[in-house]
Amino acid sequence: MKKFVLIIAVCSVLLPLDVHAQFVRLEKYPDIPVEFEAAFVDQVTNYVSGVVKSLYGQYFGQLSPEGNIYGYGSFYTDMDGEVYGLYRNGDLAFGIKKGAEIAKVGTNEHYVAYDLRTGYPVYIMKNNQKYNPSTDMREKNKFMVMTYPNGDKYVGETCDNKREGYGLYFYSNGNFYYGKYKDNKQFGYGALFKQENNNVTIQYWDESSDED
């Protein structure tokens, strides 16, 4: 009788969970190799930028020579809320979707979802399956709003209360920056959006770079 119970218990652990979210260690979102990101930047770096209005909302960002949404951009939509990141032929390739209650960071197929009321990660979506974040991830990672005495504001991922991951930095002059952060500093590729002339400037930051 004990053997029978043991077999059932083991099987229940190994079977995939279709209804309830699985508890596994899983990347929050795809880690984009710097070579791939550099190749993307090489293509879009000279693309013009501007504001485009459509039935879905208003886009501010880069446009291909054919006039397609392509490159770094921000989209204000009724369906997804505020969407920032990398676009390819009108579709979000990687970025932040910030709705009324949930913020999603990653691709459309593989992303981490944060509860904006608490800031904590609630699930990871990959291959149409929801997974529970690990305990370590829940304890250290949040999606936060940080305000500073000079009027600037950071909205994005954090780790141990430091800017870490992808986020948005809103300057008091109306401009904002989208990109990756590491140990409280801008890191890797990102884009500065200038409201006064609707211009987007791609920037690169490494370990030795100083923030604006």
Image: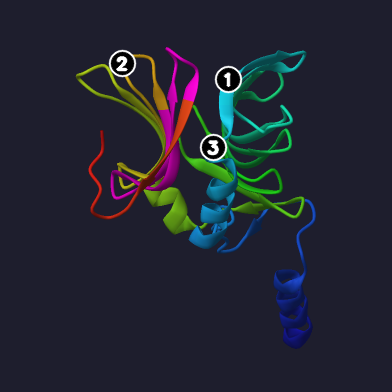
The C terminus lies in quadrant: top left
Nearer the observer, disc 3 or disc 1?
Answer: 3
Q: Nearer the viewer, mark 2 or mark 3?
A: 3
Between the residue at mark 2 and the residue at mark 3, the CA separation in whole angstroms equals 27 Å
Query: Which image quadrant: the N terminus?
Result: bottom right
The verdict on residue 194 being magenta is: yes
Colouring used for the render? rainbow
- What amino acid is found at the position of numbered circle 1 in the picture? Gly
- The residue lying at 51 percent from left, 58 percent from top is 134
Q: Is residue 63 above or below residue 28?
A: above
| Residue drawn 31% across the image and 16% down it | 172
Crowding near the residue tagged with mark 3, few <14, some 14–19, many ≥20 C-alpha atoms within 10 Å: some
Using residue 192 as the reference point, say whether residue 37 is left or right of it.
right
**Residue located 67% across and 33% down the image:** 64
User: What residue is shown with label 1?
Assistant: 50
Is 84 included in the stretch rendered in magenta? no
- Whether residue 190 is visible here, answered yes or no, is yes
As measured in the structure, the alpha-carbon distance from the residue carrying label 2 to the one carrying label 1 is 21 Å
Q: Amino acid at mark 2?
A: Ser
Q: Which residue is at 48% across, 28% downward?
A: 200
Q: Which mark is residue 46?
A: 3
The magenta stretch spans which residues?
177-199
Residue 148, how many percent across, how many down? 24, 23
Please rate how many residues cluster around mark 2, counting C-alpha atoms within 10 Å: few if below 14, some from 14 to 19, many from 20.
few
Q: Secondary structure at mark 2?
A: loop
In the image, which disc is placed on residue 172? Answer: 2
